[in-house]
Amino acid sequence: QVQLVESGGGLVQAGDSLRLSCTYSGRTFNIYNIRWFRQAPGKEREFVGDRSRSGFSYVADSLKGRFTISKDNAKDTVYLEMNDLKPEDTAIYYCAARQSGSGNFDYWGQGTQVTVSS
C-alpha cells in the first residue's frame, strides 16, 4: 500500500504562485511514477504532469512554462510549482502513484483545492 497526502492549496490572485506538495509513504520502494491531475467543477479530470523514479519530469503542453515538477527524495515528496496562475487553473489537484508492473494509478491522495481569483 502507498499513502499520498497533498498540501499547499489555497486561494490566490491571478498572477500569483503556489507550490503543491505530494508526500508519499508506505511501500514507496515500488513506486514507478507519481502523476499530478486536476479536476475543475463540471469538467473531466485533466493530466497536469508526471515525475518518474528515474528523475524525468514533464508537464502537459498547455502548462509548460508555468508549471514545473520536482522531487525531494529525502522528504519523499513531489512538488508541483505553479507560476502565473490564472482563474482557469482553479481546480482540485490530486497526486497519484503507480507501482512498477501496474498499468494503473492505484493510489490517490485526497486532493487539495486551488482557487485563483481574477
Image (cartoon, rainbow, N blue to C red):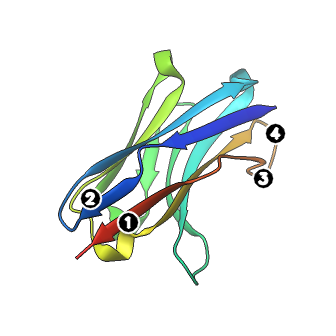
The reply to whether discs 2 and 3 touch (Cβ–Cβ < 8 Å) is no
Which residue in the structure is indicated by mark 3? 104
- Of badges 4 and 3, nearer the viewer stands 3
Give amino acid for label 2. Answer: Arg
Label pair 2/1, CB-CB below 8 angstroms:
no
Which residue is found at the position 81% from the left and 39% from the top? 101
Image quadrant containing the C terminus: bottom left
Per the rendering, the mark at residue 101 is 4
Q: Residue drawn 43% across and 63% down? A: 60
Q: Point out the frontmost of discs 2 and 4.
A: 2
Report the amino acid beneath label 4. Gly
Asked if the residue at tag 4 contacts the one at tag 2, i.e. Cβ–Cβ closer than 8 Å, the answer is no
Q: CA distance from mark 2 to mark 1?
A: 16 Å
The quarter of the picture where residue 72 lies is: top left
Q: Which residue is mark 1?
A: 115
The picture places residue 116, in percent across and down from the top left corner, at: 31, 68
Does dot 2 land on a helix, a strand or a loop? loop
- Residue 55 visible, this orientation: no
Q: Which residue in the structure is indicated by mark 2?
A: 66
Marks 3,1: beta carbons within 8 A: no
Q: Is residue 69 positioned above or below 115 on the image?
A: above
Identify the residue at image location x=54%, y=78%: 41
